[in-house]
Image (cartoon, helix red, strand yellow):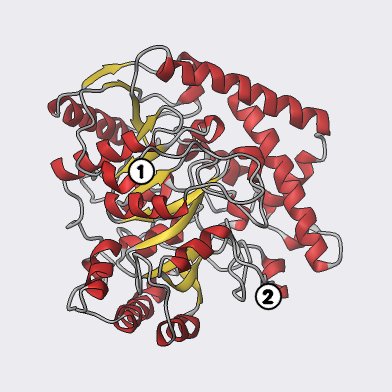
Amino acid sequence: MTDLASLDATAQADLVRNGDAQPSELVDAAIARIELLNDELNAVIHPLFDRARAAVSGTLPDGPFRGVPIVVKDLDGELAGAPYHCGNRLLKQLNYTPTVSSHLFAKLEAAGFVIVGKTNTPELGLMTTTEPLAYGPTRNPWDTTRTPGGSSGASAAAVASGMVPLAHAGDGGGSIRIPSSMCGIFGLKPSRGRVSHGPADSDPWGGLVMRHVVARSVRDSAAVLDLLQGYMTGDPYTAPTPTRPYAQELGTDPGKLRIGLRTNTPGDLAITDPICVAAAEDVGALLASLGHTVVNASPTALDETDLMANFSTVMMSWVRAELAEIAEIAGRPIVADDVEPMTWLFYEVSAGFDGGAYVTSLNKLQRWTRRMVSWWLDDGFDLLLTPTVAEPPPLIGDIGRQDDGGANSSARSIPFAAFPAPFNVTGQPAMSVPLYWSESGLPIGVQLVAAPFREDLLIRVAAQLEQARPWAERRPLVHA
C-alpha cells in the first residue's frame, strides 16, 4: 500500500481481489495523488471525488477491475451527470452536463473501475497539444515547460505522473499515440469498429476516430480492450470478433516477423528530427535482435501527397457539424468569440465545402486505404515501424499559440500528426511503445502498425518489447 502510484491497474485490482486493499483505499490514494500534483500539471479539470467516494461506499460491480481508479477525457464520450465541455468556452459557460453515458464509460464502470475525474483536452480535440483557452495548458511531467501532446495529453500526463494507472483516450489523428510518445507510456489505437462510439455518437469524423485507453503496461491495455471491444446495438459497423481474449496474447510468441522501417514522414509533410530517427532505428535493431527481419521498406501509398487535403476536408466538415450541435445546445448561432481562432478558421474554411466535396474526399481516402493495406496483405509484411512523432515534445505555446488566427497551430501540428494520422484513415491498429529517451530525458516513442484487425499481433510484439526493455521503472520529474 506504500507505493500505489507505481502499480498498474491489474496489480491494483489484485490487491482488492486478494483482500489486501479496499476499493476506498485505492480511490482515496488516487484522489490524494491528484490533489498533490494537479496544480503543477493541470491534468484533471473536473474532479469527481464525491462521485467516486459515493461509488466505493456503495456496492461496486464485481468486475475484473473492481475499485481501481481511472480518469476519463472530457471529450470522446459522455459521462452522465458530469460536465462535458470538450475544451470549449461556450460549453463551459453553459456548464453542459449530459444525462446519458457512452457505452465505453458504462463498460468501464461495469468492470469495477471508479472514475475519479475528467481530464483536460484541446478544443474539440483539434490540436496535437493540450492547451485550451477554456482551461489552460496541461504540462508534461517529464518537463513541465513542454506539452504532453494532444488531444489525450492530460490523460497521458495523469498516467505518467502516477495519478492513476490508466486513463480513457481517443484518437482521430494520433491522439492516443502522440501523448503516449511524449509522456513515455503505452498507447494502442484499436481498429476501426473495435470499440463502439454509441449511443450518442455514430461515426465521428467519418470513421477517423477510435477510442481506448492510455496505460502504463501492455497487460492493462489488452485487458481493457477485452472489456471495451464488441458490437453494440445500432453500431454502423463493427470489427471482427477476436479469436480469443487479447489478454491471452501476452507472452505468446509472435513468431519471426517481417517488419518494414520508415523514418521520413508520409508525403514528406515534415522533416523528422534526428532523435526521432534514432529512436526508430534503435527499436528496429532491438526487434532484429529478437529474431525479426527488419528492412527499410514501407507502402508506396505513403509517398502520395494529397492525403492531408482529403483528411482536412473530412475533419473540417465534422468540425462544422460539431459546432452546429453546440449551437443547438446553446439555443443560438455560434459566433467567433465562442470558439478558439483555429476552430473558427476550420469553421470558415469548411463553409466552402458542399456535400459533394465531403463525399469525394471520403471516397479518395477509402481508395487510398486499399492501396495502403495491400502492403500488409499482399506484399508479405507483418508490421510497419516508424517514429510516433517527427519531433520531440515541444514547449508549451509552440503549437498552442493562436494570435495569428490559428494558422500557426494548424501548421505546427503537422509534424506530430504526420506519422500517426494515416492509420486513422486506414482504420488499422497502431501503437506507440515507450522504448527510447533523449539525452535530456524526454521520452521518444515509436509506432508499430499491423494489418487491419490484428491487435493481437501488436499486443504480442508489445509484450515482447516490454520484457526485452522494461519501461515501468522509469519515472518523470513530476511523479507521485
* Mark 1: amino acid: Pro
The alpha-carbon separation of the residues under discs 1 and 2 comes to 35 Å
Q: Tell me, yes or no, whether the two marked residues, 1 and 2, touch with CB atoms within 8 Å.
A: no
| Percent coordinates x, y for residue 428 in the rendering | 47, 32
In the image, residue 249 above or below residue 358: below
For label 2, the SS is: loop
| Percent coordinates x, y for residue 292 in the rendering | 20, 23
Residue at 46% x, 14% y is 300
Foreground residue among 84 and 395: 84
In the image, residue 381 above or below residue 308: above
Residue at 35% x, 41% y is 244
* Mark 2: amino acid: Asn
- Quadrant containing the N terminus is bottom left
| Percent coordinates x, y for residue 67 in the rendering | 35, 74
Residue on which the image places disc 2: 95
- Quadrant containing the C terminus is bottom left
| Percent coordinates x, y for residue 224 in the rendering | 39, 55
Total numbered badges shown on the rendered structure: 2
Residue on which the image places disc 1: 392
